[in-house]
Image (cartoon, rainbow, N blue to C red):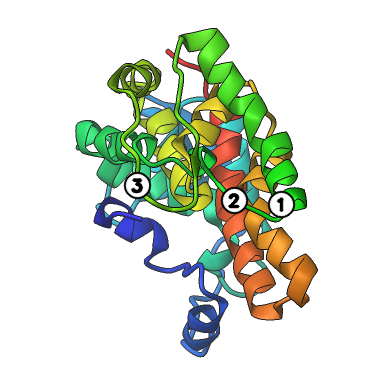
Amino acid sequence: MSDLFESFFAESPVDPNEAARRSMRPLRRRFYETASLRETAEGVAVELDGKPVRTPARRLLAFPNAAIAERAAAEWRDQVEVIDPARMPLTRLANAIIDAVADRPDEVAGEIARYLGSDLLVYRAEGPERLVERQGRAWDPVLAWARDSHGARFVLVEGVVFTTQPERAVAAMRALLPDDPWRLGALHVVTALTGSALLALALAEGAIVADETWSAAHVDEDWNMDLWGHDEQALARRAFRRTEFDAAAAILALVPDP
């Protein structure tokens, strides 16, 4: 993920080994009694004991609407003795959106668009047949949605040799990228975590639900685990990443296009 999201991961690594190392550092003790919401000119702000929360860049932690702000406030309420940023994925994503995405939306959109040129869904296994079938069941409906709803016809590739995708298809899907920084930031996170801008855009449009998106992104990994057994470290990394994904999916679900 890009340096635009450095603040997003600064206190919450997706690698559980790094998380364990950071857990050795002292966490700040919970210093507040209540987490509530207040309507402001910037949006619905989270307040602790009536005082506003600030992002790392000292901007107001304010959300587009009460529905998504309440989820962030719940993260603050769920902290017990200490404040553990690893358990606050929505707050961290909001920090990244407010401090980074809002200032450089074109750069973020460009990063998402680059995935369209070599998207996960177009590179198919040459075999075995069962894996090819799994990929087809999970990925073909999304490609059909891109084709039928937006006229974007992508070329399937067997193996990993890079193949240039039709400019018209890439342009059609890039046209779906939102201007709103909240949806754009969430879309970036889903794209980076799944390896697929097509999956992220389908999720954003409601063509696929969150659980289907996450499963589709892990077809190959699940296949390897079925063959060779579960890797506990890989599963722990996936669990960390799922919390980040769910925060982004919540924004896409609760923050509509302006």
Gap between marks 3 and 2 measured at Cα: 15 Å
Q: Position of residue 85 (x, y in %)?
A: 51, 65
**3D distance between C-alphas at marks 2 and 1:** 9 Å
The residue drawn where x is 58% and y is 74% is 82
Circle 2: residue type: Glu
Q: Nearer the viewer, residue 63 or 12?
A: 12
Query: Residue sitting at 62 percent across and 55 percent down?
Result: 243
Who's the residue at 68% across and 46% down the image?
Answer: 132
**Helix, strand or loop under label 2:** loop
* Nearest to viewer (mark 3 / mark 2): 2
The part of the image, by quadrant, that contains residue 8 is: bottom left
Q: Which residue is mark 2?
A: 126
Q: Point out which mark residue 131 bears.
A: 1
Q: Which residue is mark 3?
A: 162
Q: SS at mark 3?
A: loop
Compare marks 3 and 2 and give the one earlier in the sequence.
2
Inter-mark Cα distance, 1 to 3: 20 Å
- Is residue 235 found left or right of 6 in the rendered image? right
Residue 60 appearing in the image: no
Mark 3 surroundings: few (<14), some (14-19) or many (≥20) residues within 10 A? few
Amino acid type, mark 1: Leu
